[in-house]
């Protein structure tokens, strides 16, 4: 089925181009015209592959999520409880250049998702998966006696999410103030607080 | 000098309109054409008041900052050390609708600042003021014996910033997951950690 393969490849090419435009210039640089030009398409030809810009942005965001999910899956593989929680928390933090770049796409996505219901729902689905995974590992860690704290799981999950989101923004805007080393120290301190002395 | 007053008023009007467009539809809704239309200007007339869109976005962002700074100044007035730190941390958290709305403008600004050097520098100047203020109050609190923790000030400042930035994003995207009540609990827990039992 060469035509189907070609179609998928072209969608992937369009997302490559959009990714690069966002990383270089943000949402405003990723115009339909610029995406078409960079992908080597005539104006209007993008419609054959994506219904509109929102779908292209969503595809680009899903690639960013996919990259992160792959890293998470690899890091968590075979682990449960505290060990899995540690793995997922450090793997999702913007500590490496690849994660910081994916965060650039995520920032653009957030900006747009606040005002776009479809993108908003797509993000909430991801967020709820992420929060549910964190809650599962916390519960396993408590059951195993590896996690001991009076702070409720709901609050711990939310703290992890807020720290991660804040670090995603600051790793892009002020990486020499909110350094990777400081991020590691925050995460180390968090785990010190929730584990037995 | 009626002409000068008029000019300032029109700049303020343009920023009002841009603010409303961003809150409603984000960066993409705040096109020069739309700003001109909503402000009742002919296309091209915006140039008499702002050199370009970046300056309009920056003006809008400065209003958001101004609103927050005013709240901070009022809350900190006459306080020092731990008391001032508590006041500034709770006053800058997106706990009230006004702060959440200002956060919408801030999110748009961040998206653009990552790819725009002038906006980036404007944000870094604000960030450094904010961080310096936090560091000053921490140092005063330690000197007074009200703040007692082995965690270095640099790390505490950064933790406050990351939590605030993460909460700014989540209060817009998932206010029913990262609730204001959870935010308060995070901040309460932070102050419990850095103050004597």
Image (cartoon, coloured by chain):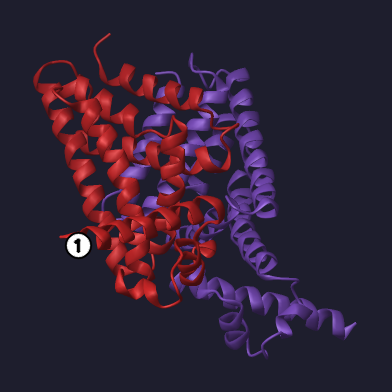
Chain colours: A red, B purple
Q: Is residue A174 left or right of residue B107?
A: right
**Residue B17 found in image quarter:** bottom right
Residue positioned 28% across, 45% down in the render: A66
Residue positioned 63% across, 90% down in the render: B40
Residue B52 drawn at (x, y percent): 70, 71
Q: Residue furthest front?
A: A2
Image quadrant where one finds the N terminus of chain B: bottom right
Q: Is residue B95 visible in the rendered structure shown here?
A: no
Q: Which sits in the foreground, A77 or B185?
A: A77
Q: Residue furthest left?
A: A143
Residue positioned 63% across, 38% down in the render: B79
Query: Mark 1 falls within which chain?
Result: A
Residue B41 drawn at (x, y percent): 67, 89
Q: Which sits in the foreground, A18 or B172?
A: A18
**Residue A95 found in image quarter:** top left
Kindly identify which residue carries mark 1.
Answer: A4
Q: Which sits in the foreground, B46 or B163?
A: B46
Residue B38 vs A30, above or below: the answer is: below
**Residue A96 found in image quarter:** top left
Q: Residue furthest top?
A: A197
Q: Is residue B138 visible in the rendered structure shown here?
A: yes
Image quadrant where one finds the C terminus of chain B: top left
Residue B116 drawn at (x, y percent): 64, 54
Query: Callout 1: few (<14), some (14-19), or many (20+) C-alpha neighbours within 10 Å?
Result: few
Element carrying mark 1: helix
Q: Is residue B86 left or right of residue B4?
A: left
């Amino acid at each position: 089925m060469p035509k189907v393969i070609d179609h998928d490849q072209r969608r992937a090419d369009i997302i490559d181009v959009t990714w690069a435009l966002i990383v270089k210039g943000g949402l405003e640089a990723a115009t339909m015209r610029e995406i078409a030009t960079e992908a080597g398409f005539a104006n209007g030809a993008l419609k054959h592959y994506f219904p509109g810009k929102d779908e292209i942005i969503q595809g680009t965001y899903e690639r960013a999520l996919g990259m992160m999910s792959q890293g998470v899956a690899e890091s968590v593989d075979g682990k449960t409880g505290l060990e899995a929680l540690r793995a997922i928390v450090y793997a999702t933090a913007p500590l490496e250049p690849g994660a910081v770049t994916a965060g650039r796409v995520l920032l653009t996505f957030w900006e747009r998702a606040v005002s776009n219901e479809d993108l908003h729902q797509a993000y909430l689905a991801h967020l709820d998966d992420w929060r549910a995974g964190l809650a599962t590992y916390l519960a396993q860690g408590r059951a195993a006696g590896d996690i001991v704290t009076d702070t409720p799981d709901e609050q711990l999950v939310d703290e992890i999410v807020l720290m991660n989101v804040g670090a995603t923004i600051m790793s892009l805007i002020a990486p020499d103030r909110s350094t990777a080393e400081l991020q590691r120290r925050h995460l180390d301190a968090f785990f010190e607080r929730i584990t037995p002395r």
